[in-house]
Amino acid sequence: MKKKKQINLSIIIVSFNTKEITKQALDSINQSLKNSKIKYEIIVVDNNSHDGSKKMLEDYAKKKQNNTIYIQTNTNLGFGKGNNLGVKKSNGKYILLINSDTIVLNRAIEKLFYFYKNNEKNIHFLGPKLLNKDLTPQPSAAYFFSLPVVFATLFLKGDYWGLTRFSPNKFCQVDWLSGACILTKKTYYNILNGFDEKIFMYMEEVDLLYRAKKLGLKTYFYPNAQIIHLGSASSAGKTFPILQVYKGFIFFYKKHYSKLSLLILYFLLKLKAIISLIIGKIKKDNYLINTYEKAFWIS
């Protein structure tokens, strides 16, 4: 009987209609870990793509059969449920959740992995510094969504001023990290029962790391490991992400906050939708009108 390969790190990718960039992500991961002592596997969960991803991933898995597992869902499970499936099939003690729209620079995964291992008594979740395509910092560490943070997000361009999300230049503890790349132990992920599968897309990592903090698990940002994150590659246009964010805020507040806080949240979301609708009608911007009419009714 063939002995099962010992795996240290399971890398989970969920893809949906991102054939070319998923291939780019896979190549960058393997290149980053070339000649590494880390015994790793890559598990790709494809959410029933219809852009040629299935054939590409089948071929890739056959070619890289020593380390690549391809799972086809035959339906779009969403981000959270897709990751949960990938983790369930994984064999590693450590798991790296990484988006299909990422490019690993240099030896970023190795840096992240060994830093985590060397400090795992204090670190439970760890994320790298994310960069835009032009290598400028991408805000990827953040504060939990208290009402002031929601207000800053909706009305003050909070990311620009560092009021909501930011990109530190030194190792530090943070509330939550972008789900584009998070390293943890499979044990911790399982204690939390993974991502909440009621969330289809957006807010999964916020909810996960909020629940983690309530259990005393700590989240940290490690800027010495750097990864390009292209962003929103699976979303068609800007309307869908905005509506999912609206739904995500409401779900998060219903789950974790008081009824009074939820009522204030509804007011803020409606106000944002009304202001955007007025601007859309003044500018005759159909995108703003269509998006925020839908957002108004969601809130």
Image (cartoon, rainbow, N blue to C red):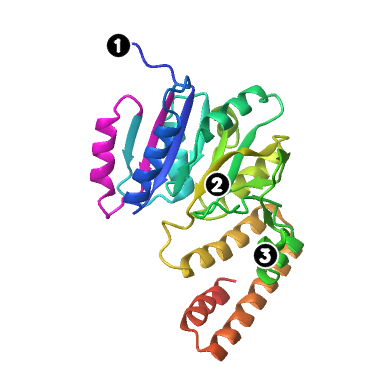
Q: 10 Å neighbourhood of mark 1: few (<14), some, or many (≥20)?
A: few
**Residue 58 part of the magenta-drawn span:** yes
The image position of residue 23, as x and y in percent, is 34, 44
Per the image, the residue denoted by label 2 is 179
Taking the spot 26% from the left edge, 43% from the top edge, the residue there is 56
Q: State which quarter of the image contains the C terminus.
A: bottom right
Amino acid residing under circle 3 = Thr
Residue 14, x across and y down, in percent = 41, 44
Residue receiving disc 1: 2
Q: Which quadrant of the view contains residue 4?
A: top left
Contact (Cβ within 8 Å) of mark 1 with mark 3: no
At numbered mark 1, what does the secondary structure look like: helix, strand or loop? loop
**Is 12 drawn above or below residue 147 in the view shown?**
above
Q: Secondary structure at mark 3?
A: helix
> Crowding at label 3, few (<14), some or many (≥20) Cα neighbours within 10 Å?
some
Q: CA distance from mark 1 to mark 3?
A: 54 Å
Compared with residue 58, is residue 296 higher up or lower down, i.e. above or below?
below
Question: What residue does disc 3 label?
Answer: 153
113 w.r.t. 26: above or below: above
Reading the chain from its start, which is encountered first: label 2 or label 1? 1
Please state which amino acid type lies under the numbered disc 2. Answer: Gly
Is tag 3's residue or tag 2's residue first in the polypeptide sequence? Answer: 3
Q: Which residues are magenta?
A: 40-67
Query: Real-space Cα distance between discs 2 and 1?
Result: 36 Å
